[in-house]
Amino acid sequence: MRLRRRAARFLIPVIASGALASLAAPVLAQERALAFSLTGGVSLAPEYFGADSTRIGPGGGFGFGGVRLGRVALGDPDAPRLFAPGTGLRGSFRYIPRRAGKNELAGLEDVKASLELGLGLHHTAESWQVFADLRYGAIGHKGIAGELGANAIYRGSGGLVLHGGPRASFGNARFARSYFGITAAEAAAAPNFPAAYRPSGGMHALGLEVGAYQPLNDHWGVSATLRYDRLRGDAARSPIVQQGSRDQFSASIGLTRHFNFRF
């Protein structure tokens, strides 16, 4: 609870001030612009938070570059490259697949698939980056989740970009109860979970991510990531995680298409 409050006190003012600064900043060009990227490929990830088994399936991502309408701008639609130096807002999105109450989770209710939407604030230099993202479960869990992180950045020849650094994931109580909690009704029906469990919000994972991006031309590129997370706090103490694993590994590779519209 204390970690959640500290994270909220830090993130909300920072992201709000960044949003106001971005919206208020005048731009010289008056044209309207929209820049974003779409990634499609294959991912390897735990079947659910705390699982000791993995699933292979389609993977994807959405990257928000920026939008400009006259003198009002959000983000930077003119950023010339991935991890372009600067400070500003970015989109933050995450899809969490459905969790079925079967096999070792028999007796637990299904958890619907969730789509988290939000904003992040980043500061990127030539060789490093720090960022903070805050998201809302607009579809699904209806909770608040987010991430703090930092990257060391290597820029190679041919546009190659390598990045890597620590990650800290957090969520509020509603998020924690959706993925790590057990209700009294579920405990009565689940043979593997005879007692109810009601976790609090806060930092639920610490980890490390490394990634690579290789452009193929001005519009296409190949993206890959490898990530490890260690569940902690109330999440790690959840009976769901106790019968699974605190160690969570994921990886993805995909083709990225960049879009930059002027209208």
Image (cartoon, helix red, strand yellow):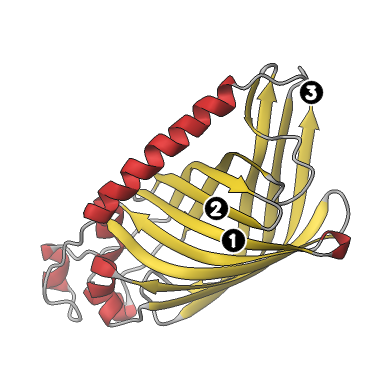
Q: Position of residue 123 (x, y in %)?
A: 59, 46
Task: Tell me the SS state at disc 3.
Answer: loop
> How many angstroms separate mark 1 from mark 2 (CA)?
6 Å
Badge number at residue 151: 1
| Badge 1 vs badge 3, beta-carbon distance below 8 Å | no
Q: Is residue 204 left or right of residue 223?
A: left
Q: Which mark is residue 221?
A: none
Q: In the displayed structure, does residue 5 sit left or right of residue 23?
A: left
Q: Nearer the viewer, mark 2 or mark 3?
A: 2
User: Disc 3 marks which amino acid?
Assistant: Phe
**Residue in the picture at 51% in, 70% down:** 208
Residue bearing mark 2: 130
Check the image and report above or below for 67 versus 107: above
Neighbourhood count class around disc 2 (C-alpha, 10 Å): few under 14, some 14–19, many 20 upward: some
Q: In the structure shown, which secondary structural element does the residue marked by tag 2 occupy?
A: strand
Earlier-in-chain disc, 1 versus 3 = 1
The residue located at (18%, 75%) in the rendering is 190
The residue under label 2 is which amino acid type?
Answer: Val
Earlier sequence position, callout 1 versus callout 2: 2
Residue 79 picture quarter = top right
Q: Quadrant of the N terminus?
A: bottom left
Query: Mark 2 or mark 3, which has the lower sequence index?
Result: 2
Report the mark closest to the observer, 1 or 3: 1
Disc 3: which residue: 263
Q: Are marks 1 and 2 in contact (CB under 8 Å)?
A: yes
Expressed as whole percent of the image width and height from the top left, the position of residue 151 reads 59, 61
Relative to the observer, which residue lies in front, 129 or 236? 129
Q: CA distance from mark 2 to mark 3?
A: 32 Å
